[in-house]
Amino acid sequence: MVGADLLGYNGAKALTYVEELLESVAQRLRPSPETLEKAKLYAEKLVKSVEELFGPGTASVEGSFARGTMVRSREEVDIFIHFKPETPVERAAEDVLKRGTELVKNLGGTVRLRYASHPYVEGFLEGLRVNLVPCYDTEYGKWITPVDRTPYHTRYVKSVLDERMADEVRLLKAFLMNDGLYGAEIRNKGFSGYVCELLIIRFGSFLQLVRQASGWKPPVVLDGEKPMSPASAITLLDPVDKTRNAAAAVSLTTLSKLIMKSKLFLKEPSDSYFLSRTSFKPSVEGRCFLAVVLDVPERPPDVLWGELTKTLEGLAKALSGYGFKPLRTDRWFEDGKGLLIFELESLSLPQVYLHTGPPVWSMNAVEFIDEQARKQDLAAYPWVEGERLCSLRRRRFTNAADFVKHLIDGDLASFSKNLRPFLKKSKIYTNLDEVYSAMSEEGRIFLDDFVRTCPNFIAQYHSLG
Amino acid sequence: MVGADLLGYNGAKALTYVEELLESVAQRLRPSPETLEKAKLYAEKLVKSVEELFGPGTASVEGSFARGTMVRSREEVDIFIHFKPETPVERAAEDVLKRGTELVKNLGGTVRLRYASHPYVEGFLEGLRVNLVPCYDTEYGKWITPVDRTPYHTRYVKSVLDERMADEVRLLKAFLMNDGLYGAEIRNKGFSGYVCELLIIRFGSFLQLVRQASGWKPPVVLDGEKPMSPASAITLLDPVDKTRNAAAAVSLTTLSKLIMKSKLFLKEPSDSYFLSRTSFKPSVEGRCFLAVVLDVPERPPDVLWGELTKTLEGLAKALSGYGFKPLRTDRWFEDGKGLLIFELESLSLPQVYLHTGPPVWSMNAVEFIDEQARKQDLAAYPWVEGERLCSLRRRRFTNAADFVKHLIDGDLASFSKNLRPFLKKSKIYTNLDEVYSAMSEEGRIFLDDFVRTCPNFIAQYHSLG
């Protein structure tokens, strides 16, 4: 392949190739002039409407539209509605939800209420997504809500970023989006748009960043600082607030995927890493899946992702502690339906297990022998191996689905409290076809990804599907 | 129970009970006057015959008969034939085997050639077992064969032991014999007759010894010395040769069984610990056994036990390394038939297993991804979990019997070289009934013990069978 091996010897020739490749991808990532025109039009209308309703100077345009880093087919306009610090948070939210909704409807659009860290209104105007988000005009650093920093971020990015760099940001965003590494929400634990902008500002171009990233070893600390928290996979200071790690949301797995994808991209550059998803269907022969399908309550997405994650981890820990081996786990929800899924080494366990008792010389050696004889689940009487007493015991559950049902029925694992009543009515599947049948189209795509195991970029590198 | 709880409060009363119990057991352990008479008669005849054949002063009476510590129904007479140090070991052995055999036959007996550390002749005269053993009259400490110390042991023990203490030795021997803890051969890794005598000399009585032993914590070092080897479970200096640990053959498991049995005996004293074996048949439901049945070559027993042990351990290690869990293992042979037996947690393994690759930041992360794609046994393509790459692989063997056959056919485990050709023709069973069918009566008793898991003394303590 012409462009192969950027990590290796054919540097100069490969560089021309990859630059041409990136230029052609960047072109495809720029929003169309018509969409930009539409976005501009609606941004102006929204600012005007907000100021009519909330007072002059209360509206600002933020986000990727304001910064010129929007990615084609992901176009959206963020309008922030500014409140004075003395306004109670609940009132500001209520105001935005109620009057923002009216406002979008008056412009001929439809709305959906959304929640990130706090509620906002998502509207659709001729297919263009617009967000109306409440924020506070506070003194610098005295943020009331996390989005109060955003206008500062916008101002900073706009002051630094030019057209060429906006292309580089789009390349990075698409590179991340294509593998679910984009977005700081708890769902993805990925890179926010702002972090993408900061990384391009820091490294100058997408290619420079990817070259650096391909050599990273977590924990990564940029700017020669110490990690702000030992738990941070990557530390990247927010130029607007130097007490804050802008990349705090990035998980170790997400960061590691970027590192690995960077290596593979440099080895075999291709536009598929930005623009296409694999449809490779792997073999499932001999593999074991267990799924818990449940109705989920109407809650802010971040809260629900958190609750599903906690429940997933609680179940995985209990399964593992009992002897089942969860090899991989994931969770998903959409439109009131949730899914916890596990790939297990096996759906069944041996009937008996070795129970290791105390050494013969310990105070309770005789007691152990007395006790074992009374156990209902004793499979074989104690013996002496080396200096230890052992016995064989019977497992109460040898079937993973029965065990999970038992955990759920008895609240015997660390579950999200809010999900408990929904878990009790959940269905447990171990047949993958049945899980597919229980899922929506969106859910099936998630399930395909889970069953495939490898991320898009590895499938593409392997030329799968 | 009257005698219960010697470890607890009812000391005085219990002591009377246990002393009466031991006295009655000791009575039953003494050889009958008739047998003693017979042993005495044959000892004299044998000494006479040996001296006629090998010269005056070449015969001595050794062992438990000479020391007066024989246990009823285990009666035997050891005659040592003394050679001068200049006689080559092979010639001495040949002489004893050839002329000793004639000698026993001339007295109307039958013979069997036996080997311990070196060959000897075992004869039967009216049901009495007699052993003709070659040894050397060497300077003190300059032993040529291990049994050259024996005449010194006999002299030492006879000089110290009286009638009462002989009873105590018999109690200890029977206590150990009843659970296979007696005999220093590699089969039992237990206490020799001489060690039993030394222990009684050291502690004064069986009961005193058992009281001490119930409080031992291995490694046990008697006489306040340091252990002579860090591998010794118990160190007991040989009064005849103070550079030697008389109890070197005792394994940690054997010693631990003595400790545990001592505790249980003191808690609930009973004559069953000396004189009866349980016939308890445990449930085998859900338990998994794998047996290798093979013809074994004609070899000295100690050598063959060693070879079987090495092969057993090699197989167990390979099974365990592959993912099977050997919970217990043992080996046995008799009359040309050998058995290696394993209790496994399961006879089958899941089809797939988690293969953990390098971290994404390592030099060979890309190589790992390249390699995995070429693997025939790849079950799912690599993914990123935390900072690591992982993949799913298929096991070539999911069935324990197939795997063991593969190991044997390919010489893929640490087997005794001499047993290899016999292993190749072995049969592998996973059905316990079929193993029983393939065994002799002796083999079935061994198998019963293995399946029962617990030693006699624990079965008796639990009142099983």
Image (tube, coloured by chain):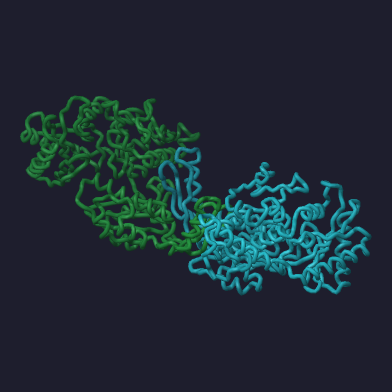
Chain colours: A green, B cyan
Q: Is residue B424 visible?
A: no
Measuring 66% from the left and 61% from the top, which residue is drawn there?
B171
Residue A433 sits in which quadrant? Answer: bottom left
Does A173 sit above or below residue B180? above
Locate residue A344, reporting x and y percent. 41, 56
State left or right for residue A157 relative to residue B1: left
- The structure residue drawn at horizontal position 21% and vertical position 46%, both measured from the top left corner, is A300
Left or right of residue B347, residue A187 in this image: left
Which residue occupies 73% across, 55% down?
Answer: B194
Residue A224 appears in which quarter of the rendering?
top left
- Name the spot of residue B158 as percent of width and height, x first: 78, 55
| Residue positioned 74% across, 70% down in the render | B32
| Closest to the observer, A298 or B263 | B263
Which residue is more in the foreground, A94 or A129?
A94
Whether residue A372 appears in this view of the structure is yes
Query: Picture coordinates of residue B411 (x, y %)?
Result: 65, 58
x and y percentages locating residue A230 in the rendered image: 38, 33
Q: How many marks?
A: 0
Is B455 on the left or on the right of A107, as rendered? right
Q: Is residue B436 above or below residue B364?
A: below
Residue A216 sits above or below residue A280 on the image: above
Question: Observer-nearest residue: B316 or B127?
Answer: B127
